Amino acid sequence: MLAGGCFWGVEGVFSNVKGVISVESGYHGGSAATAKYERTHDGKSGHAEAVRIVYDPSQVSYGTLLRILFSVVADPTLKNRQGPDVGSQYRAAIVPMDANQRRVATAYLAQIGGGKYFAKPIVVPVEAYKRFYRAEASHQDFMRRNPRNGYIMRWDAPKLAALKRLYPDKVRATPAP
């Protein structure tokens, strides 16, 4: 599971990656009672907008997914914000689903830290999995269904263009569900 700001763009980018089987927008952490868009918007619910990614490791590695997250989707030097969205619900975070993913995530953050790739410190946490709550249907596949939406055009379409430019061999012909 990955968080990288508003889940519309995170889902939109990863659904276009070869080897990704499905991407689902939702809320990580918090409680079921507050796992609603209207309740998470103030940043006090403990949730992060996140995506649950099912992928085929024979086609795309977890490390590649992390590389795409931090070279296309999210700035790992920003705490509790991405693009125009501010608050802990928009934090970037890595939520490993097993010990191997945790090892890869920790090693990857160490690799990109220390000023070698980013001028500012890396502030992305590796968070323990708590619970994933699927977002409302209106948020699923939002970028694909609403390509002319002003937010999508300004903030998320450039991320998809960056994926195609930086990782042309990793782009699917048609998005995953």
Image (tube, rainbow, N blue to C red):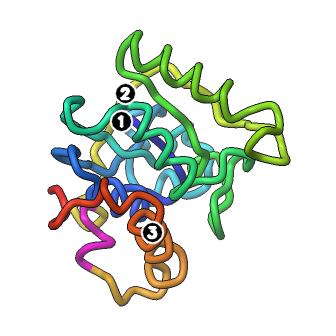
Q: Amino acid at mark 3?
A: Arg
Q: Which mark is drawn over residue 165?
A: 3
Q: Which secondary structure lies at badge 2?
A: loop
Residue 144 lies within the magenta run: yes
Compared to 54, does 10 lie above or below?
below
Judged left or right of residue 63, residue 168 is left
State the residue position of label 2. Answer: 131
State the residue position of label 1. Answer: 32
Q: Amino acid at mark 2?
A: Arg
26 or 166, which lies in front?
Answer: 166
- In space, the residues marked 1 and 3 are separated at their CA atoms by 39 Å
Q: Residues within 10 Å of mark 3 (few under 14, many from 20)?
A: few
Say which label, 1 or 3, has the lower sequence index.
Answer: 1
Of discs 2 and 3, which sits in the foreground?
A: 3
Q: Amino acid at mark 1?
A: Ala
* Segment colored magenta: 140-145
Asked if the residue at tag 1 contacts the one at tag 2, i.e. Cβ–Cβ closer than 8 Å, the answer is: yes
